[in-house]
Amino acid sequence: MAIDATFWVAVSFIIFFGGLIYLRVPQKINDVLNKIILDIKNEIDESEKLRTEAKTLLYNAQKKLDTAKKVKNEILDQAKIDSDKLIIELNDKFHKSSDLKKNLTENKINQMKDNAIKEIKDASIKIAAESVKKVITTSIDKSKLDALFQKNLDETKEELKKINS
């Protein structure tokens, strides 16, 4: 039997694999690969937890945003209602104030009118009395004049009492 190079390659190949098995290289390779697989699984689990946490945070943020939008809309609606009420209230106050001023002005005008009429009547009575006095003094004697004056004075007083009442 001749030992040729193939034999020695086969023997060295067996010795090499035997040495690898003896030194537990395949187990170490397996352990390293298992460790890498475990690390990858841990990273996947961690990323899954982060994804779940991110979804939860997104959901909570969306919920807060929706709540904020609702609150904003409620505040805007309330502000609109309040402004409408305020406008109506101010409008009512303005109309009441203008009505009050109108009434006061009308009362002043009526009072001034009454005063003017009274002054005109007083002046007319005074002028009429003086005219009558002049006519009477020039045309009637003294005794008839006193009686007529007293009569006219009494009538004038009665008329003034009626007008003032």
Image (cartoon, rainbow, N blue to C red):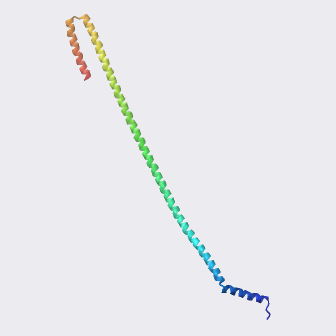
Image-based side of 127 in relation to 154, left or right: right
Q: Residue furthest front?
A: 23
Residue 14 % position (x, y) = 71, 88
Work out whether residue 165 or residue 49 is closer to the camera in this orientation and state it: 49
Q: Residue furthest bottom?
A: 1
Screen quadrant of the N terminus: bottom right
x 48%, y 55%: residue: 68
Identify the image quadrant of residue 48.
Answer: bottom right
x 57%, y 73%: residue: 42
x 73%, y 86%: residue: 13
x 71%, y 88%: residue: 15
Screen quadrant of the C terminus: top left
Identify the image quadrant of residue 30.
Answer: bottom right
Q: Is residue 154 above or below residue 64?
A: above
Identify the image quadrant of residue 132.
Answer: top left
Image-based side of 109 in relation to 66, left or right: left
Image-based side of 30 in relation to 63, left or right: right
Q: State the count of labels.
A: 0
Residue 114 % position (x, y) = 32, 23
Residue 123 % position (x, y) = 31, 16
Residue 50 % position (x, y) = 55, 67
Q: Is residue 154 above or below residue 94?
A: above
Q: Is residue 9 above or below residue 66?
A: below
Q: Is residue 131 above or below residue 20?
A: above
